[in-house]
Image: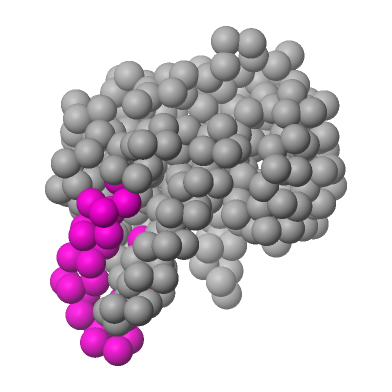
Amino acid sequence: MNTPPSPQLGTGTPRLSLNRWTFRTTPVQEFLETTAARGIDAVGLWRQDVAEVGLEALRRRVDDAGLRVSTLCRGGFLTAAGEADRAAALEDNRRAIDETAALGAPTLVLVVGGVDRTDKDLVGARARVTEAVAELAPYAAERGVTLSIEPLHPMFTADRAVVSTIDQALDIAEASGSPAAGVVVDTYHVWWDPTLERAIQRAAATERLFSYQVCDWNLPLAAEPLHSRGYMGDGYIDFPSITRMIAAAGYTGDIEVEIFNEDVWATPADEAARIIAERFEQLVLPHA
């Protein structure tokens, strides 16, 4: 399930993929053109782009720019306790899987959802995620798509993800019984984990390491902590060390840079792409 980068890399930085949300305020066409102009040949897209442009039109734009889609973000939000809400979430995730396949992306990123405030049952919420992933994985496999469960930092447990570690994500993936369920390692969310290296090795041993995303952890935290993601090298994350763990696990796929940061969004797209490529070449690529 480990999808290698295209054999025809761009003239720019090999293995680098630019995540759309790093350029959130840039129009999607400009984002695609900026990526291609820098010789980067892959992008991570979001479902908001599908809603804005249309699925077929977005695929045409990606193809016309000579790009590939490394991931689609996001599915998930599977923790609702109510039966009607659960059914609606499953149906939305099936649509997300269909969109992923139509875009030619190998994997759909799942942000599983936070605690349901109607019952505040954390254990129950995780159990509902496990059930939902088991139900969705065969549907994904039939369409040639994998599901990358994304652990989020524990501070997001209440509202975004009741899965905080790679091991928790792997427990859910393995319980599905399907090779289509696995994990994405996002440095912003897992760099603090003392069991990180062992968990990455576990993901590799079970062939469930589907994606690797990088950005830094900046301080002070922004009022919206998700917006404290920064350029590699601006914060506290040891990218060479974590990237060597990923490489030792045998991962050879795209490495996505996903940054949510007001200052980055205010930077002209070409300048932000230049900084990202330089930092990637300095801190990530030599160890990948």
Q: Position of residue 66 (x, y in %)?
A: 74, 24
Residue 279 in sight in this render: no
Which residue is pictured at 37% across the width and 77% down the height?
85
Q: Is residue 14 above or below residue 155?
A: above
Q: Nearer the viewer, residue 109 or 57?
A: 57
How was this image coloured? Answer: one colour
- The residue that appears at 80% across and 52% down in the rendered structure is 26
Number of numbered tags placed on the structure image: 0
Q: Quadrant of the N terminus?
A: top left
Where is residue 208 drawn, in percent x and y? 28, 34
Residue 127 located within the stretch drawn in magenta: yes
Q: Residue at x 73, y 58 (%)?
A: 52
Q: Residue furthest top?
A: 7
Q: Judge left or right: residue 263 versus residue 99.
A: right
Name the main secondary structure of what is drawn in magenta: helix
Residue 3, image x and y in percent?
Answer: 43, 23
Closer to the camera in the image, 161 or 72: 72
Q: Is residue 88 above or below residue 17?
A: below
Compared to 197, does 112 lie above or below? below
Which residues, given as a range, are shown in magenta?
Answer: 112-137
Confirm whether residue 69 shows in the render.
yes
Residue 58 as seen in the image, left or right of residue 259:
right
The residue located at (57%, 10%) in the rendering is: 7
Q: Is residue 263 magenta?
A: no
Name the quadrant of the C terminus. top left
The picture places residue 244, in percent across and down from the top left corner, at 37, 24
The residue closer to the viewer here, 266 or 89, is: 89
| Quarter occupied by residue 39 | top right
